[in-house]
Image (cartoon, rainbow, N blue to C red):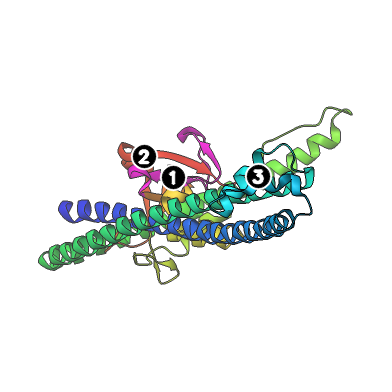
Amino acid sequence: MGQVDQLGASLETAIAQYQFATYRLNGIEHRLRENRHELRIAKLNLRTSQRIIERRLVTLYTGEQASTLEVILGARSLDDMINRIDTEKSVSKQDTAVLDEVTSARTAVAASGRRLAHERALQQKIVGERAAKKQEIESKLAEQRRLLASIKGQIAQLEAADRARQERLAQEAAARLAQERAATVAQQNSTIVGVSASAPGQDTVIAPPSKYSGVVGIAMQELGTPYVWGGSAPGGFDCSGLVMWAYAQVGVSLPHSSYAQWGYGVPVSPDQLEPGDLVFFDGLGHVGIYIGGGQFIEAPHTGAFVQISNLADRMGDFVGARRIL
């Protein structure tokens, strides 16, 4: 079973990396749309400015301002004419303003073009990385299926024992949460009494409990739900999918990626963890929800189920924790 668990952990990491690549691709596609829009506007501004300059050149050529005609003699192209006029001291302020607009539009077109090219190159790179991760995932899944098939009887015994253990852990966690809620209510009531009896300007201040501790009870309703790659709804979860779904039930939107979820909230030290905090492992490749009592709830890996685990058992690959605000 050790080999199966090790393979499951590496598979979970590969899946998390695939999801993060998808998250990054979504951001790139958004930026590509913005850059294409900016490029269209820049090109439109350039064409408008060039048409104004062209009309101005016609005016100069037909002799309305003969003194400036010498500027365009010998010019080989519109760009050459613009450069000649731009350096000619006799050009009016209006001409100079239009030339500035042409120069600005040209700069904007070039900049937008460079940004677009950069985002396209990045998109191709990440698409390639994601394809490689998908191939790696499929290979690991096939290997895991072969291993699981070879120890089917042993797995059945272990699953039965684990189910009994998880039921016990769930009952203990539920009782602990009920006690914590009762203690919080009692503390709030005593705070109200203390404030009303205190002298003016001497309010008693007590830090509130974790704002989203309610996600613990929501996530615990899914204990026993099978791990499903890409799953983010009852019936099947992966690690970040469970976190995303639980927080969505309390109105908080999180991305479907453990790597991306690390960028939300604020850091929390292990000794300050409260129910609802996110705990991260394996180089951010795995995430769970702290439930108190040194435990967290997680969707571990393919072949497993949503379960309660001990944080102490995972401190070897513990990365850190975040509290969602």
Q: Name the residue under label 3.
A: 71
- Indicate left or right for 217 with 305 as reference: right
**Towards the viewer: 223 or 96:** 96
Count up the numbered dots. 3
For the residue labelled by badge 1, is the local secondary structure a helix, a strand or a loop?
A: strand
**Towards the viewer: 91 or 230:** 91
CA gap, disc 3 and disc 2: 72 Å
For the residue labelled by badge 3, is the local secondary structure a helix, a strand or a loop?
A: helix
The x and y percentages for residue 167 are 38, 60
Question: Of label 3 and label 1, which has the lower sequence position?
Answer: 3
User: Which circle marks residue 114 in the picture?
Assistant: none
Q: Which residue lies furthest to the left in this view?
A: 150
Q: What stretch is highlighted in magenta?
A: 262-285
Residue flagged by tag 3: what amino acid is it? Val
Asked if the residue at tag 1 contacts the one at tag 2, i.e. Cβ–Cβ closer than 8 Å, the answer is: yes
User: Is 148 placed above or below 16 here?
Assistant: below
Q: In which quarter of the image is residue 151?
A: bottom left
User: Which circle marks residue 279 in the picture?
Assistant: 1
